[in-house]
Image: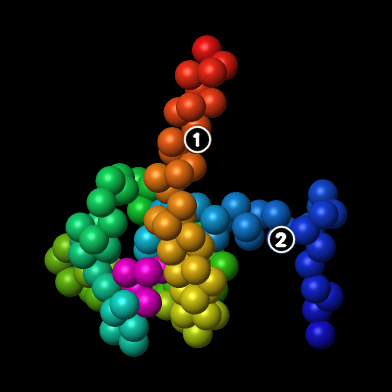
C-alpha cells in the first residue's frame, strides 16, 4: 500500500493534486461529466456546457484530468476525429466533495463579495 500524502510537506504531490482539483474549470468539468455518467461527453459539448472556458484551457484541464486517471478520453477515427470524455470511478468519487465546495461557494458568495468590497473601500 502506498503511503498517505502529507499536505504540509513541501515535497508532497498532494499540493499539486489540490491545485488541479481546486481549479474552477475542474469543478465545472467534473460536474458536467458526473451529470452525464455513465455516458461520455464530446469535447465540443463540454465547451458549450462550461461557459467562459477557452478551447486551450479546456484542453489543458482535460489533459491533466486524464493524466491523473480521473477522466477517460476516447477518440473516434472520424473526419474530423470525435473526442469523448467520461469520468473514471475515482473521478466520479470526486464529484461529491466538489459539489459540497460548489454549494458552499454559491451560498456564501454574496457575503464574501460584500465583505471584500467593504474592505477595499476602507483600505483604499
Q: Main secondary structure of the magenta part?
A: helix
- Per the image, the residue denoted by label 1 is 115
- The stretch of residues the image draws in magenta is 30-34
- Per the image, the residue denoted by label 2 is 14
Name the residue: 37% across, 63% down: 29
Q: Quadrant of residue 41?
A: bottom left
Name the residue: 34% across, 83% down: 37
Quick one: label 1, few (<14), some, or many (20+) residues within 10 Å? few
Give the Cα distance between marks 2 and 1.
31 Å
Q: Is residue 20 magenta?
A: no
> Horizontal placement of 110 versus 21: left or right?
left
Which residue occupies the foreground of this view, 75 or 71?
A: 71
Q: Position of residue 69 (x, y in %)?
A: 54, 73
Name the residue: 17% across, 71% down: 78
> Horizontal placement of 90 versus 40: left or right?
right
Q: Position of residue 43 (x, y in %)?
A: 27, 63
Q: Position of residue 108 (x, y in %)?
A: 46, 52
Amino acid at each position: 500500500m502506498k503511503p498517505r500524502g502529507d499536505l504540509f510537506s513541501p515535497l508532497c504531490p498532494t499540493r499539486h493534486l489540490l491545485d488541479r482539483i481546486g481549479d474552477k474549470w475542474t469543478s465545472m468539468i467534473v460536474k458536467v461529466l458526473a451529470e452525464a455518467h455513465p455516458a461520455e461527453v464530446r469535447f465540443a459539448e463540454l465547451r458549450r456546457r462550461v461557459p467562459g472556458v477557452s478551447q486551450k484551457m479546456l484542453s489543458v484541464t482535460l489533459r491533466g484530468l486524464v493524466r491523473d486517471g480521473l477522466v477517460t478520453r476516447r477518440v473516434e477515427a472520424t473526419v474530423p476525429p470525435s473526442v469523448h470524455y467520461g469520468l473514471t470511478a475515482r473521478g466520479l468519487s470526486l464529484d461529491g466533495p466538489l459539489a459540497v465546495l460548489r454549494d458552499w461557494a454559491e451560498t456564501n458568495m454574496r457575503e464574501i463579495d460584500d465583505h471584500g468590497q467593504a474592505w477595499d473601500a476602507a483600505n483604499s
